[in-house]
Image (cartoon, helix red, strand yellow):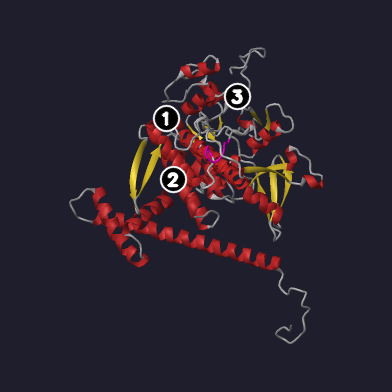
Amino acid sequence: MTNTVGAVQDPGVDPVDPVAVLAMVTSGVAVTEASIIRLQAVRDAHLAVAQRLAEHLATASEASSTRGEAVDLAARSVAAELAAVLHMSDRVVQGRMARAAELMTRYPITMQAFTEARINTAHVRLIQDTGARLDDEVRAEYEQVAVAACEGETPHRAKRIVERIAERLAPRSLTERHRTAQEKRTVWREELPDGQKQLGLIHSAAIIDGIFDRLTQQAHLIKTANAKAVKEAASGIAPDPDGLGNSDGLGDSDGLGDPADDRTLDQLRADLCADTLLTGTPSGHDTTAGLLAAIRARVEVTIPAFTAMRPDTATGCDSHPEVGAAFGIRTERPGERAGLWAAFGVRAEQPAELAGGQPIDTDTARILAGGATAWERVLTHPVTGAILAVDHYRPNADLRRLLHARDSRCRFLTCGLPPRTQDLDHTVDAAYGGPTEEGNLGGLCRRHHVLKHQTAWKVKQLGAGILEWTSPTGASYIDKPPPPVTFTIHQSDMPGPDPDTSPDQPPPF
């Protein structure tokens, strides 16, 4: 073959370096994305001006309508003008005008970071929506920390931290808001095309996760039984109508498994849900031994020790001293030793979290704790919040518990899948002498586990659970373990000893 100048090339040499091309493409995409974000910030600035113009027009109007009605009418008029050139609904444009004006006036730090392309539109939406419940007095503090948390992170992964920040500064605790929100729990129907309807349920986060987990376990059991039934049918093994003929308890084709059943996991979950709601148990799918009905939902919850032990003592919270009895401890009265928590500048209540980071109210958390037969204790550093150990650090099960607590999401950059989806990956492969210990293991979802082994992406441990990823182009990215559900303090913030307290006197907790 020849090139454009007629020189003969070695047919075995690729004239294009794929790594160099990928580096060029990556750089180009990064520059382009930053330009797009800056233009989106400029667009929001224009929309904010449009909202202010509408308010000015409403002030100048001599109409007899009230102030609110006048502003709304003026905003509709301006939005209609913009919608004509944007080819969008004027309702959507009016909503964007209001959000943009709020961003400019109430979130200046966020707007500055947006303009500089340090965060994107999804980050801005997260900060605005999460900060909506905060008072003006604490918004600047919230905004500064939230923007720092969003920089360099995906919105999904930053959401966990931003919500924690807002929760600590919120005027009402999560438990108070949850009690109010639970009054609106409901089930509804919505018509869909092709003879379908949608059933919706709003309930406590722990309840919803438990429902979904139980349906998933049942669906997986059916899928496994179906696969086994296919093999047995191919081998000519007679089916067992009771589903009890095998030591594994899965049954045969006339029991739980059906070789002709080709439903997907989503379809099975939907059918099992309908069957359970209509009959009380999934009788249409279960065996005579009741294997599916015996499955119980699992919900993984992380609860700060003081949250589990103490009733709510924050201002405005109802007290439930009877909850502490489930732990066999004396519960405190409302406000008792509240000054101890105030000394650290934090709310007495620290919300529990479901696996994956969603906070839940303390009432639900304590009920789950009271009904659990065993809990895993996670020891964290009092200053940094880093996870130090999980009960009885030993190889195998205890090591897995420690890593499960430390890596509460996939440890690849940008990924936020919860622990139940993880594989424990050896950073240095065991085949090459990599030890099976905390400093050489990390939780990765299957997608990114395969990516690490089958592509040029590399990872190494920097200590304390910190991973350094290196892309095929040589770019380095740091991923730190997600902070546990705890609060940390600086040494300078720790209250000094009380001169009136004897050194021998026991601490107040």
Q: Which residue is mark 3?
A: 374
Expressed as whole percent of the image width and height from the top left, the position of residue 420 reads 59, 40
Does 58 appear above or below 363? below
**Quadrant into which the C terminus falls:** top right
* Mark 1 in CB contact with mark 2 (< 8 angstroms): no
Question: From the viewer's perspective, is the residue at label 3 or at label 1 nearer?
Answer: 3
Q: Main secondary structure of the magenta part?
A: loop
Mark toward the start of the polypeptide (1 vs 2): 2
Pick whichever, 289 or 145, lies toward us.
289
**Residue farthest toward the bottom in the current orientation of the protein:** 6
Expressed as whole percent of the image width and height from the top left, the position of residue 230 reads 58, 46
Cα–Cα gap, marks 1 and 2:
19 Å
Quadrant housing residue 355: top right
Q: Residue at x 51, y 25 (%)?
A: 366
How many other residues sit within 10 Å of disc 1, few (<14), some (14-19) or many (≥20)?
A: some
Magenta span of residues: 250-256
Say the numbered circle drawn on residue 111. none
Q: Is residue 457 visible?
A: no
Element on which disc 1 rests: helix
Residue 473 shown in magenta: no
Q: How many marks?
A: 3
- Residue type for callout 2: Asp
Does 5 appear above or below 229? below
* Mark 3 in CB contact with mark 1 (< 8 angstroms): no
Expressed as whole percent of the image width and height from the top left, the position of residue 250 reads 58, 36
- Residue type for callout 3: Ala
Does 253 appear above or below 194? above
- Residue type for callout 1: Glu
Q: Which residue is mark 1?
A: 176
Q: Which residue is mark 2?
A: 129
